[in-house]
Image (cartoon, rainbow, N blue to C red):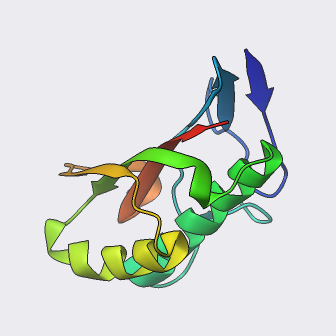
Amino acid sequence: MQTIATPDAPKAIGPYSQGIVSNGFLFTAGQIALDPATMEVVAGGITEQTERVMQNLQNVLVAAGLSFAHVVKTTVFLQDMGEFAAMNEVYARHFGSHRPARSTVAVGGLPRGVRVEIELIAAR
């Protein structure tokens, strides 16, 4: 196993890694809308938060030598399923024509009170 760590994504705020490469796959920790420079939640709503989450994920992918084109599966955790369309618009823009498998679930709460958390698996 190889640990992936980059200063361009939020530092782990617990006993976990930003990403782990194992058996040809990258598994990321869930990313929330933390600005890696300040470790504070970005201002704004679901659109701004999803943008920051996608930027954080992209930076972990880049640190592993990958891109969104390598992603095979994502899991999206939403505080409010009523915000799905706004999240999906940002998500789709980052993936372009690539369409990985995805699960989206509504949750009772997320760290730091954020609106969205996303994790992914990418083929190396």
Residue at 44 percent of width and 52 percent of height: 118
Q: Nearer the viewer, residue 102 or 80?
A: 102
Report the residue that reaches farthest toward the front.
97
Q: Quadrant of the N terminus?
A: top right
Residue at 64 percent of width and 39 percent of height: 13
Q: Is residue 31 shown left or right of residue 10?
A: left
Q: Position of residue 55 (x, y in %)?
A: 64, 67
Q: Is residue 107 shown left or right of residue 4?
A: left
Would residue 121 be seen by someone viewing this image from the given angle?
yes
Q: Nearer the viewer, residue 11 or 96?
A: 96
Q: Position of residue 90 (x, y in %)?
A: 44, 79
Q: Is residue 89 shown left or right of residue 37?
A: left
Count up the numbered dots. 0
Q: Position of residue 94 (x, y in %)?
A: 53, 73
Would residue 17 be seen by someone viewing this image from the given angle?
no
Asked if residue 51 is positioned above or below residue 111 in the image, the reply reads below
Asked if residue 105 is positioned above or below residue 33 in the image, the reply reads above
Q: Quadrant of the C terminus?
A: top right
Asked if residue 102 is positioned above or below residue 85 in the image, the reply reads above
Report the residue that reaches farthest toward the left.
82
Residue 29, quarter of the rendered image? top right
Residue at 51 percent of width and 56 percent of height: 32
Residue at 81 percent of width and 47 percent of height: 63
Asked if residue 17 is positioned above or below residue 100 in the image, the reply reads above
Q: Position of residue 65 (x, y in %)?
A: 80, 46
